[in-house]
């Protein structure tokens, strides 16, 4: 898990530096939404782990150390990842992974 946690930390730092408003809270109060940097970092991690969405959600929930990197208590629902995939084109995410 150490390698994956380091990778999650790298993606989190990278995404935080990439967004225009890095001081926005990770989870928006009241609406259950996530900030842009958390979405990007989790999508990058999802691509790296390469598991189906439901398995990725379970995977994250079984690894609280990784969730701690993002300041989360539980993983976002797998449907959130589907929505986020539409928010951030794969071409942009691949460019960020380079």
Image (cartoon, rainbow, N blue to C red):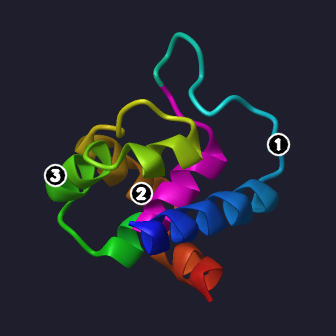
Secondary structure state at the residue bearing disc 1: loop
Q: Say which of marks 1 and 3 sits in front.
A: 3
* Residue 51, picture quadrant: bottom left
**Residue in view at x 36 percent, y 33 percent:** 74
Q: Which residues are magenta?
A: 33-45
Can you say which quadrant of the picture contains the N terminus? Answer: bottom left
Task: Work out whether mark 2 precedes mark 1 in sequence or the reverse, and give the earlier one.
Answer: 1
Assign the C terminus to one quadrant of the image: bottom right
Q: Which residue is mark 3?
A: 54
Which residue is found at the position 64% from the left and 78% from the top?
A: 96
In the image, is 73 to the left or to the right of 29? left
Residue 88 is one of the magenta-drawn residues: no
> How far apart are labels 1 and 3 at the CA level?
30 Å
Q: Compare marks 1 and 3 and give the one earlier in the sequence.
A: 1
* Residue 76 horizontal side relative to residue 89, left or right: left
Apparent side of residue 55 relative to residue 92 in the rendered image (left or right): left
Tag on residue 1? none
**Residue 43 falls inside the magenta stretch:** yes
Q: Residue furthest top?
A: 30
Dot 3 falls on a residue whose secondary structure is helix
Mark closer to the observer (2, 1): 1
**Pointer 1: what residue?**
21
**Residue 20 percent across, percent down from the top left:** 83, 50
> What residue lies at 49% left-to-right and 63% top-to-bottom?
5
What is the chief secondary structure element of the magenta stretch? Answer: helix
Q: Gap in Å between the C-alphas at discs 3 and 2?
A: 17 Å
Tell me if mark 1 has few (under 14), some (14-19) or many (20+) residues whose alpha carbon lies within 10 angstroms of its own: few
Check disc 3: other Cα within 10 Å, few if <14, some if 14-19, many if 20+: few
Q: Where is mark 2, residue-wise?
A: 86
């Amino acid at each position: 898990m150490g390698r994956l946690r380091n990778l999650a930390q790298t993606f989190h730092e990278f995404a935080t530096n990439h967004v225009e408003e890095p001081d926005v809270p990770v989870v928006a109060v009241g609406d259950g939404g996530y900030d842009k940097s958390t979405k990007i970092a989790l999508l990058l991690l999802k691509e790296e782990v390469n598991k189906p969405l439901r398995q990725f959600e379970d995977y994250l929930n079984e690894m609280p150390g990784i969730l701690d990197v993002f300041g989360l208590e539980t993983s976002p629902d797998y449907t959130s990842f589907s929505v986020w995939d539409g928010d951030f084109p794969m071409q942009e995410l691949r460019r960020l992974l380079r």
